[in-house]
Image (cartoon, rainbow, N blue to C red):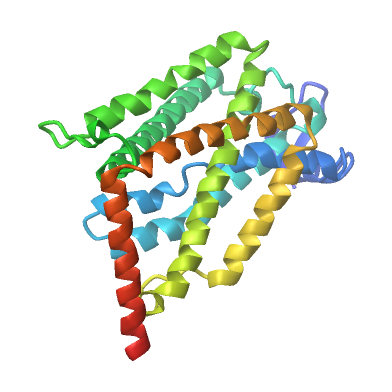
Amino acid sequence: MVMRGFVEPDGSVAQFSNLWNDGGFFPNGMMGFVAGFQIAVFAFVGIELVGTTAAEAQNPEVTLPRAIRAIPVRVLLFYVGSLIAIMAVTPWREIAPDRSPFVSMFTLAGLGIAASVVNFVVLTSATSSANAGIYSTSRMVYGLAQEGDAPAALGRLNSRKVPVNALLFSCMFLLSSLILLFSGETVLGAFTLVTTISALLFMFVWTIILASYMFYRRNRPHLHEASKFKMPGGVPMCWAVLAFFVFILWALTQQPDTLQALLLTPLWFVGLGVAWFFVRRQPHHLKRHDAFQRDLKEEARAAATE
């Protein structure tokens, strides 16, 4: 199928056969495909925010399933659909690394203000992503402070019921990006480092979520049975996702830049371990831990008597 109006400078015509011509889907071999998983995983960072908003949704039993079901549709439309459009218009050999493929595509279509439009979309998308990250991080830090797992000052609200201390604490880490930009040789190097470490940390978060889900199903099966919106696949799907994470870790070892980020990530966990060593000794945390253990024992006794 040929797309009318899209003609490359060399005379080639945009067509869907560009997707599989000139070497097929994997012209650089399977390792080139594997290397793309690093940025692909980073693109899905924050998808767990759908669950974070449950505490502030008016009707989570209705809105959350609707939002979760919309995620695959959005992935197919905005990720897969855009990639198909770009590669159909511009063959992969002609995509310039220093120029946006969206700008090239719109320019071929005769849209003279393509660069301005794309830059506007990119800036608004980045702002939206940053806003979502600040929102989720500040709420999580606030929740940790309420549970005794973070300093109490981070759990205070202002007159508008906003956790302003947790918000400022979250924004402080945004300034670290300036250090990375000026300390690295290139912006792309800093971007690769940040995206890889971010993907690794959120894979850890997703692993904790999966482990919590399996722990929840094993220890509170009656609550799971009463749930109106169950995860498709259940426990087997959790193990499948964990196996996929192992594959991603292996993929990150195959490129020098992602391997460097992989080796630096344990430093973050060392810092968390040191902080946890002091937090777990706080009286409030010990009291909450003991209460949680008592609740588990009571639930186990109640389930045994039924």
Q: Residue at x 60, y 40 (%)?
A: 200
Q: Is residue 152 left or right of residue 102?
A: left
* 15, above or below 63, in the image: above
Front residue of this view, candidates 119 and 128: 128
* 267, above or below 248, in the image: above
For residue 227, what is the image quadrant? Answer: bottom left
| Residue 147 seen anywhere in this rendered image of the structure | no
The C terminus sits in image quarter: bottom left
* 120, above or below 234, in the image: above
Q: Is residue 210 left or right of residue 275?
A: right
Percent coordinates x, y for residue 66 in the rendering: 38, 60
Q: Residue furthest bottom?
A: 306
For residue 173, what is the image quadrant? Answer: top left
| Residue 190 seen anywhere in this rendered image of the structure | yes
Front residue of this view, candidates 15 and 207: 207
Q: Residue at x 35, y 84 (%)?
A: 303
Percent coordinates x, y for residue 77 in the rendering: 55, 48
Q: Residue at x 58, y 27 (%)?
A: 194
